Image: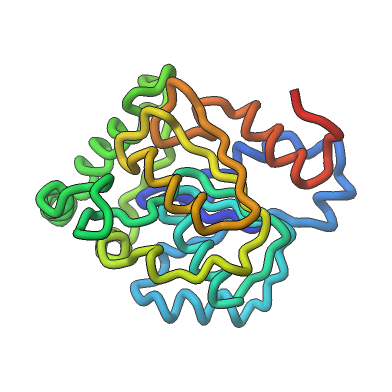
């Protein structure tokens, strides 16, 4: 099983493009189905955790983008899931700055974004798409094609609040699986320097930096991301 958790405001299955070509090893994917987790259905973090726990999932790999990566981290620390490998795509160590971390969004910027989303969710999500694609060599194409959705906008407000309130400073990373971190050098949503906080805490950690890339490395260079994922799954023998 391969478990995927998408980013805030994105369609729950927006990471499906990573696995667009499954024909070369149908037996593997028959034995390891791809499961997209729709956390936006929930407006309570404990209900979300309980839902995953009830399913008794045993994923071989977990892939989480942004907020989805943060949730993957929390599920692993709570021992709700125990994957062999973890692919993190630009999750924040902490979204909003405080005395512990300076390379993060200011309280003022967060509050402005939250207020804008409250009054005009659809327009704010479109602006968020532009920010996600900013500094990317494919910025126009990515901003246009991002799978954003304002469905469950009340729940998305809850998850936006969760992004503000949660910090990975409270996570015990001592027993984490092999972790590969994908980070765009030009990310305007999560400061690239936040990778240092993860690298200091996760024992088996590999950082893959994407030049000319914003907050969506999997859309910036899908072939490279697919190669990383398939190599870790043992589907290809080497990487270029």
Image height of 5 relative to 224, above or below: below
Q: Quadrant of the N terminus?
A: bottom right
Q: Residue furthest right?
A: 27
Decide if residue 1 is in sight here.
no
Image height of 191 relative to 119, above or below: above
Q: Nearer the viewer, residue 138 or 192?
A: 192
Q: How is the image coloured?
A: rainbow
Q: Quadrant of the C terminus?
A: top right
Please state if 97 lies on the left or on the right of 223 as rendered. Answer: left
Image height of 188 relative to 63, above or below: above
Q: Nearer the viewer, residue 204 or 82?
A: 204
Q: Nearer the viewer, residue 45 or 169?
A: 169
Residue at coordinates 79% horizontally, 56% vertically from top-left?
A: 32
Q: Position of residue 90 (x, y in %)?
A: 45, 44
Q: Quadrant of residue 59?
A: bottom right
Please state if 186 lies on the left or on the right of 121 as rendered. Answer: right
Q: Quadrant of residue 190?
A: top left
Q: Residue furthest front?
A: 200
Residue at coordinates 45% horizontally, 32% vertically from top-left?
A: 184
Please state if 64 lies on the left or on the right of 104 as rendered. Answer: right
Q: Position of residue 196 (x, y in %)?
A: 44, 46
Residue at coordinates 27% horizontally, 67% vertically from top-left?
A: 165
Q: Position of residue 70 (x, y in %)?
A: 45, 59
Decide if residue 169 is in sight here.
yes
């Amino acid at each position: 099983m391969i478990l995927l958790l998408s980013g805030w405001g994105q369609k729950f299955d927006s990471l499906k493009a990573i696995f667009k070509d499954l024909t070369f090893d149908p037996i593997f994917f028959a034995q390891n189905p791809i499961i997209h987790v729709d956390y936006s259905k929930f407006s309570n973090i404990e209900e979300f955790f309980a839902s995953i726990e009830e399913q008794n999932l045993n994923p071989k790999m977990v892939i989480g983008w942004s907020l989805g990566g943060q949730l993957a981290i929390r599920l692993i620390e709570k021992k709700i899931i125990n994957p062999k490998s973890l692919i993190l795509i630009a999750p924040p160590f902490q979204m909003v700055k405080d005395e512990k971390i300076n390379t993060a969004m200011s309280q003022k910027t967060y509050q402005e974004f939250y207020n804008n989303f409250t009054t005009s969710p659809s327009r704010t999500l479109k602006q968020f798409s532009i920010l996600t694609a900013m500094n990317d060599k494919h910025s126009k194409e990515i901003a246009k094609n991002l799978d954003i959705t304002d469905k469950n906008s009340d729940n998305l407000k809850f998850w936006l609040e969760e992004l503000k309130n949660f910090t990975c400073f409270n996570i015990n990373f001592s027993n984490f699986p092999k972790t590969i971190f994908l980070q765009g050098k030009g990310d305007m949503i999560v400061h690239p320097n936040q990778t240092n906080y993860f690298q200091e805490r996760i024992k088996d950690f590999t950082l893959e930096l994407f030049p000319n890339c914003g907050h969506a490395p999997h859309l910036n260079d899908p072939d490279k991301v697919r190669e990383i994922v398939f190599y870790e799954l043992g589907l290809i023998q080497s990487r270029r």
